Structure formats: structure tokens, C-alpha cells
Image (cartoon, grey):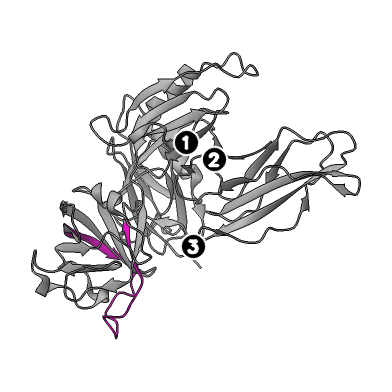
Amino acid sequence: MLVVVSDGAHDTLLLEWSEGPSDGVTGWRYRTRVWRNARPLEWGPWTDVEGSAADTRRYLLEGLDQRTGYSVEVRPVLATVEGTASNTVFASTHHPFNIPEMYPAHVVEGDGSTEWRIHRLSWVITIPAGMRMTAARGAAGANAVAVFDIASNSRLTVAFAGARSGQAVERIIRQDDSRQPARDVNALFDQIAASLRRVPLSTPIPYDRLDLTGAAATPGSYAFLMSAGDTSSAIQNFGMVAAGSVQLRVHPTDAHGQSHVLFYDRVEVGDSFDYRTAPECVHRFRVTADAPSRTPRTYGIEHIRSYGGRCGPVDDPAAAVRVELFWDPLPGYEGPDGVRIFLSDERAGAGRYRLSDGSSCVIEVPPGTQVIQDGLYILEPDAERPDVRAIVPLIDVETSSQLDVEPRTCEEVGRTVHPSASRDVGAIFDQMMASIRVEPVE
């Protein structure tokens, strides 16, 4: 019986198998099959499990592609004879900078600090160290999702909608596995329930038709209006969407024919989205008015900022140009190397960020901390500190403490720490400065 375990890494998966012959076995082999666009490619060749012997029962697959699905099998080798292949298991690697996700039938293992997103929802949990879990929808009702302890098959149910959204609403504790008789599953579930927090899901939805009439009545179409309710005010060129747009009209079915009705039903005032016409041109908006549940959906919006450059009109405004509405975007924006870049005046939680556009300094914000990048300030020349030409202030949201970093040399310029009864902000700033790396933008 083969099991594939993810610890949240973007390029590794752990293989473990519990059955198979021992007599005459000289080693083990594995093979993988990559999935692209929800379709499996051809199986790769059978490959030796390096250093394996008859009693080998685990192997770490390394160097895998990020955000990729893999089918995996193992089989024994008996001298020159190939044994019978194991069951086929599907598993996925994760994005290196996003919260890893728990999918149904996928086995994940916690480390006590890594957060996991539950099955494409806006709620995340921290799994205790060494605990293996999986997730399932349907087993817990229409507005809830269940996470299961693999060892005991005990279940914890979390509501993701309604009055109790984000709460652990039910638990079923079953007889634990005899291999770990001392495990207190109820206490482990207590830890998971206490870790629950909402982190909006970044959801890209593709569209390919800017409707110049403002109707947005066909799948894959959308429109931006300059005047609320007035379709004659529709933007006439997809490269010209900017601060003047006050309404978004969007068909709930995307350019690929996939319906997002359920997703759009959950969009609320205060949610944000990026309108991406290209990697180099992004406009960020905030929802100011809900849309009735009909087609098309019409949301009141306000422009927050544009970034990335290379925005402008195109020669054929009616062309079928692929764009994305990227809902609930992560803080900052993704640079060409995949590292997110702080946006000024925006809260940023745990993750790796470049201090500012063009800076070579990449810093890590630790879990449980939110900071605001407060701009880039050019300083007057100082004979005593000639290397300090500018500062990027990072403000701790909870305490308003401030850490100033030079965006060229990556050195700390100064800090102001305000006392907190619950957090050692000075130690957090020490941790952030210890994490800083010089990573020039190519």
C-alpha cells in the first residue's frame, strides 16, 4: 500500500509503502506521471530508488516541479525480475510563496508552524508536528468541510459559511491507532481549532472579451463602466481601465466555459481584485457594493492603485485578449522572479517580500505578524553614514513599532519599538533582519 505525503514543500514528496515482498527483493523502483491542464501525460520510466534494499519502505522524491500534480507508483525488483506495481497515488506539490493546500484524499503532515489552506477555502489551520491529515467536502454538510486525522480517522468539522463561519463546529473522536496509544487526538484538535484564521483565497478567473456595449451578457465577457448603471459609459479599450471605473459587470462563466456562480455569490463589500491585462500591467480594485445574484453580476468598485507599468491602449480594443480577474490577491504583487514586492500602505502577512520595486533586498515576515511598508524615503546626504541614502519603513500593525531598512545595502538604519504584552516585537524585528537576503532582480 503506497502513501504519498506532502509537508507543504514546492519540490518534494515523501513516498511510503507498507506492503510488498521481502524474500529475494534486491531493491525498489518508482515511476511518476505528470498532470498538465487536468490531463495526465505519459508515464515516466521506472527509476531505481537510490540505495534501496529489501526492507526499504520510504523515499523522498526531490527536484519536482512546483504547483504540479503527480501520479506515483512503486514496485520491487527481484534480481532481474520486476515485481508487481503498487496502487497508484495522486499528489501535488505547492507554490513556493503561497499557503499550501489540503485536498481530498491527499495526505499532508504538519510541523507545528506551517499553515495549510483547507480545500480551496478562505480558512487556514496549523497542523501539530508529526500529525498526518487529509480533507473532505460533502462529509460535513454543504457549508462545512472536514479534516481527518489519518492515524485514528477522527474528524474535525469546520464551518466556512453562515453564522459560525470559521469555527470548529463538530468533532468525532475514534479509537486511535495502537502504534501511538498515547496520542490525545482531542487535544490535537484543540490546537487545530485554536489556529483557525481567515486568509482570503487568491482566485484568478480568465476572461477574453471586453464588452464595449457594457452588457457582459455572454460567457467570457466583462465590462467596466465609468458611470453607475450607464452602459454607454463602458470603457472602450481594455488597456485604459483606471481610476475612473466605478462599476464592474462580469459574466459568471469564464473564457473556458467554467461557471463561477458559487464563488461570485460569496464576493462581499471590501473584497479586492486585480485586473491583469498582462504580467506587466495590473490594476487593483476594491468592491464597494454587492451584486444581485443574476447575470451579469454588477459590482460597485473603486480603484486602489495600478502597478507594473506597460499599461495603455491597444490597436484593436475589441480583440479577444486574455485577461484575469484575480480575486483576493495576496499582499504586494509578484515580481518577474516570483518574489512578491511590498505595496506601500498595504498590510502584508507572513511571507517573503522585496522591500520595494528595484530593491535587491528580500525580507521574511514571520507567521503571526503583519507589517505595512510605509513608502520609500530619499535622505539628505549624511557624512557620518554615507551608505544610507534611503530608508523603507516597515510598521508593525499591532504596535505601530517601526523598522527602517536601507533598500540598497539591506542594512538596518534604525527601529522604534513600542511595548506589547503579548509579543516581543524587538525579537520579531531581529528575526526579520536575520532573514534578509540580497537577491538582485535580473
Q: Name the residue under label 2.
A: 106
Q: Name the residue under label 1.
A: 135
Image quadrant of residue 191?
top left
Q: Name the residue under label 3.
A: 337
Residue type of the residue flagged with mark 2: His
Residue type of the residue flagged with mark 1: Ala
Asked if marks 1 and 2 touch (Cβ < 8 Å), the reply is: yes
Image quadrant of residue 45?
bottom right
**Circle count:** 3
The percent coordinates of residue 145 (x first, y second) are: 39, 34
The answer to which of marks 1 and 2 sits earlier in the sequence is 2
The percent coordinates of residue 286 (x first, y second) are: 21, 55
The percent coordinates of residue 54 (x first, y second) are: 84, 36
In this rendered view, identify the residue nearer to me: 423 or 60. Answer: 60
Task: Give the residue displayed 88% in from the left and 34% down from the top.
Answer: 23
The percent coordinates of residue 13 (x first, y second) are: 62, 44
Image quadrant of residue 365?
top left
Q: Give the answer, above or below, for where 307 lies relative to 330.
A: below
Q: Give the answer, above or below, for where 266 lies relative to 65.
A: above
The answer to which of marks 1 and 3 sits earlier in the sequence is 1
Which quarter shows the N terminus? Answer: top right
The answer to which of marks 2 and 3 sits earlier in the sequence is 2
Q: Is mark 2 on a helix, strand or loop?
A: loop
Task: Give the residue displayed 29% in from the left and 73% down from the top.
Answer: 209
Mark toward the viewer: 2 or 3: 2
Q: How crowded is mark 3: few (under 14 residues within 10 Å), some or many (20 or more)?
A: few
One can see residue 362 in this view: yes
Q: What element carries label 1?
A: strand
One can see residue 382 in this view: no
Q: How crowded is mark 1: few (under 14 residues within 10 Å), some or many (20 or more)?
A: many
Question: The magenta stretch spans which residues?
Answer: 300-326
